[in-house]
């Protein structure tokens, strides 16, 4: 049980770090590709601030995704173990 909690914390923290990074990269890529005003002097950082805001907001869903992935791996491994073996 303690190992499961450790894996949940580890995967949760990993998801909490990786998800915002990916979200910021994807949002900036799409913003610069589809909005010609992004990165121009008149923009005053609007595209970058929206990407940063979405990155901050995506931290908690990233945590939830990491914990859910750890639980999925645990129960899949537990189901694949034969009945007579611990």
Image (spheres, grey):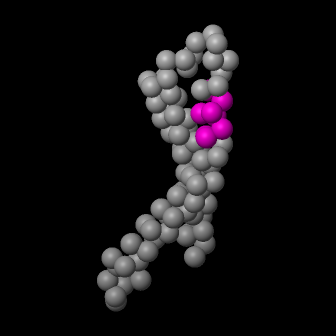
- Residue 79, position in %: x, y? 37, 79
Q: Is residue 29 left or right of residue 79?
A: right
Residue 60 lies, with reference to residue 55, above or below; the image says below
Residue found 58% across the figure and 42% down from its top: 20
Residue 53 versus residue 8 in the image, above or below:
above
In front here: 82 or 33?
Answer: 33
Q: Residue at coordinates 44% horizontally, 24% vertically from top-left?
A: 33
Give percent across and percent down for residue 9. 61, 60
Near-viewer residue (50 or 35): 35
The structure residue drawn at horizontal position 49% and vertical position 23%, both measured from the top left corner, is 35
Residue 29 appears in the figure = no
The quadrant the C terminus occupies is bottom left
Q: Which residues are magenta?
A: 48-55
Q: Is residue 82 left or right of residue 21?
A: left
Tell me the residue at 43%/74% (across/down): 75
**Up/down of 34 relative to 56, above or below:** above
Res. 27 visible in picture: yes
Instruction: Pinpoint residue 77: horizontal percent, then vertical percent.
Output: 39, 72
Give the residue at the far top of this rendering. 41
């Amino acid at each position: 049980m303690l190992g499961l909690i450790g894996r949940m914390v580890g995967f949760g923290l990993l998801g909490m770090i990786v998800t915002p990074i990916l979200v910021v990269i994807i949002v900036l890529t799409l913003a610069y590709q589809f909005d010609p005003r992004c990165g121009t002097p008149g923009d005053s950082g609007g595209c970058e601030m929206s990407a940063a805001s979405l990155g901050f907001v995506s931290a908690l869903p990233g945590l939830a995704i990491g914990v859910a992935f750890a639980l999925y791996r645990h129960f899949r491994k537990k189901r694949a173990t034969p009945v007579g073996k611990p």
